[in-house]
Amino acid sequence: MDTFVQQLINGLNVGAIYALIALGYTMVYGILRLINFAHGDVYMVGAFAGYFIALSLGLAAGPSIFSLALVLLGSMIIAAIVGMIIERFAYRPVRKYSRMTTLIMAIGVSLLIENLFVARIGAAPRAFPDFLGSQSQPPIHLFGNAAISKAQIIIFLVSIALMVLLQWVVFRTKVGTAMRAVSFNLNSAKLMGINTDAIISLTFAIGSSLAAAGGVLTAQYNPNIDPLMGILTGLKAFVAAVLGGIGNIPGAVLGGLLIGAAETFVVGYGSQIGIASTYRDAVAFAILILVLLLRPSGLLGSTVQEKV
Amino acid sequence: MPTFLKRILGLVVVVALLIGMNTFMGREGLFGFGLPYYYAEIINLTGISIILAVSLNLITGYTGQFSIGHAGFMAVGAYSSVFMTVYYSEGLEQSLTGLVGATLAQSLVFLGVIIFGALVAAIAGLVVGIPSLRLRGDYLAIVTLGFAEIIRIIILNIDRVGGATGFRGRVPPWDGRLIIPQYANFIWIGGFAVITIVVVYNIVNSDTGRALISIREDELAAEAMGINTTRHKVLAFVISSAFAGIAGALFGHFRQFLHTNDFQFIRSIEIIIMIVLGGMGSITGAVLGAIVITILPELLRKLPGDLYSYRLVIYSALLIVIMLTRPQGVMGAKEFGLSWLKRPQRRPEGDKPAGEKGVPIAQQPATAVIDQGKEQGKEHA
C-alpha cells in the first residue's frame, strides 16, 4: 500500500508536468490542426531561460519561493515570445500549404532550436538551482512510508493553478471565446471580425508559457537540464494530448496525469510481471497506439466527421 | 535495338561499373589507383542512404503517407540479419565452402541473411501498417514514430544482441561468430541501390503506382473511384519497410557494429530530409537528396574550427528555408536524366506518368490522375 501511494504521488507529479506541456499541443492542434513538434523544445527553452535568469540575477540555490516565482514568471514570458516568433516566421508562411509541409516545417524548427542550443551551450547537462530545498528539507510523511516532498506539493499546486487559470481564460473571457471560435472554424471566425492571426499568435504565447512553466518545475524536481530534454518529454506530452482527445483542454490534463501515472507504475511494478523498467519510455507510445486503435478521438474528444 | 537487348546491355554496364568501382575502392585499387578507406566508406554509406531515401519516397512521396519511423524498420532488418549471420550461418557457410568455394559460399550466405532481414522488416511493416494505416496524416506520423521507438527499446532489451552495449559479435553465454564479418562491399550496396531504384520506378509507373498517387492526391476520391486504399497503402508500406530492412542488413554487415543509437528518431528525420530536399515523388530527387545529405556533413567537417559544430544548425535551417521557398522540394515531382533508361515510347503523348510534364499534380485537373489510372488499368488487362 505504501509503495502504491508513493508511486501514485510520483506519477501524478510527473503527470502534472506532462499535462502542462500537453495543453500547448492541444490548443495549437485545436486551432491549426498542426502537431507543433517544436513545443517540446519550447519547454526546454523555458527551462534554460529560467536557468539563465537565475544565473544573471545571482539567485543562489536555497529555499526561496520568491526566487522561484521570479524565475517562473521570467521564463514564461521569454517562452511566450519564442513561441510567437516561431509562429510568425515559420508556421504562418506555410499555413496555406498541405499538412505534410507544415509538419516538416515543425520538425525543422524543432531541430533548429535543439541544434542551436547544442552548438551554443553544449550538450552537457547543467544543474538548475534548487529553490525549494527539496534536497535539504525532509519530506512530509503521509502515512506509513509514503512521503511527499515540498517540491512535489508546490509543483502540483502551481500546475493546478495554471490549469485553472487557463480554463478561466478560455471559457470566461472575450479572448477565450475568440480562441474557441477560431478553433471551431477559422474562416467563419475571420468573417465575424475576429483577428485570427492575433488569436493564433496568442494561442502560441499561452501554450509556450505553460510549457516553460513545466520546464522550470521539472527542473525543481530533476535539476539536470540539457538541450535535448524536450524531445522525449514533448512526444509523451503529445501522446497525453491525444489520449485525452486532442483539442480538448480538460482531456489534455487527464491524459497527462494518466501517462505520468502509467509510467511510474511500470517502473515500480513492471518487474513483478516481467516488464523491465527500461520499457518506461515505451509505455506512452504503447498507450498511444492502443488509443488510436480503440478510440481515435481520445477519452474526452468527440469524433469529427470528414466532409468532402 | 530490341528492349531485352537494351536491358541486358544495361545490366552488363551496371555490373561492370559496380565491380570496377569496388576494385577502385578496395585495398589494392584499380590499375594502381586506389581510394582512401575514408572516401570509400562515405560512398558506401551514400549507397545505403539511397536505398533508404528511395524506399521511403514510395510511401511518403508517392502515397502521401507521412512515416517517421523508417529507421525502426532499418533497425529490424539490421539486427535480424546480423543475428542470423552471427549465430546461425557459420556451419552453413563451412559446408557450402566445401561444395562451391569460399567466395560463392560467403555470397550465398550473405544473400540469404539479407533476404531474411528484408522479410522480417516486411513482416514488421505489415504488423505496424495494418492498424496504423487506417489513420490519416499526422496521426500516422506519430504512430510510426511510436512504433519505431518501441522497436528500438525492445531491441535494447534483448541480451543476445548486446542490448545497450551494442552488437559486435556473439554475446558470451551463446555460441556463434566472434565478430560480425564484413560481407558488404560496394558491389552489394551499389547493386541493391540500383535494384531499389528499378523496383520503385517500376512500381510507380504501373497501375499500382497510379493508385498510390491517387491516394496521395485525394484519398476520399481514390476510394470513391474503387481503389482499395487500405490495401494499397499497406502494400506500399510493406515494400518500403522491406527495402529499409535491406539497407539495415547492408549497414550491419558493412559497419560490423550495431547500436540502437544508430536507429533513433533523428535517423528517421534524416531520411525525411533527404526526400524533402530532393522532392517528394521524385526518384532522382531522392537519390540526389541522399547523396547531398550523406556527403554534406563530411564536407562541413572541413569547415574551420567552430563552424563545424554548427553543421546540424545549417541542416535544420536548410530544411526550413526549403519549406518556406519550395515546399514541394528542390526537384518537385520532376525526374531528370532518366530518359535514356525509359522504354521506347509505346504510350500516346498525353499519357505520360503523373507529374512528368513538370506540372505539379495538384495544379492539374482533379480528374487527370484518376483517368490515367483507369486507362493504365485497361492497358494491362
Image (cartoon, coloured by chain):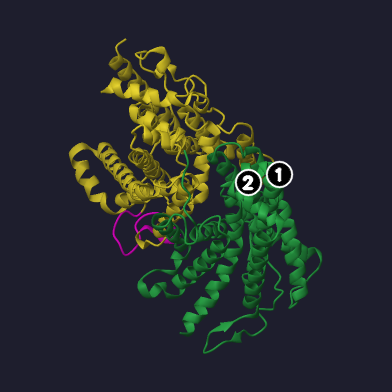
Chain colours: A green, B yellow
Give above or below for A236 relative to B225. Answer: below
Give left or right: position of A69 versus B324. right
Q: Residue furthest right?
A: A57
| The residue positioned farthest toward the left in the image shown | B99
Location of residue A157 (image quadrant): bottom right
Instruction: Please name the amino acid that badge 1 sits on.
Output: Gly
Most distant residue in the top direction = B1
Q: CA distance from mark 2 to mark 1?
A: 31 Å
Q: Which residue is mark 1?
A: A193
x and y percentages locating residue B211 in the rendered image = 37, 31
User: Can residue B129 be seen by looking at this rendering?
Assistant: yes
Q: Nearer the viewer, residue A160 or A263?
A: A160
Q: Judge whether residue B165 is colored magenta.
A: yes
Is residue A103 in the magenta section? no
Chain of the residue displaying label 1? A
Q: Residues within 10 Å of mark 1 (few under 14, many from 20)?
A: few
Q: Residue furthest bottom?
A: A144
Image quadrant holding the C terminus of chain B, namely top left
| Type of the residue with mark 2 | Val
Quarter of the image containing the N terminus of chain B?
A: top left
Q: Residue B146: x, y in percent?
A: 45, 54
Q: Secondary structure at mark 2?
A: helix
Q: Nearer the viewer, residue A68 or B364?
A: B364
- The reply to the same-chain question for discs 2 and 1 is yes
| Main secondary structure of the magenta stretch | loop
* Residue at (62% x, 73% y) in the render: A156
Report the magenta residues as a range: B161-178
Measured as percent of width and height from the top left, residue B344 is found at 36, 13
Q: Which residue is mark 2?
A: A109
Q: Nearer the viewer, residue B277 or A248?
A: A248
Asked if the residue under mark 1 is in contact with the one under mark 2, i.e. CB atoms within 8 Å, the reply is: no
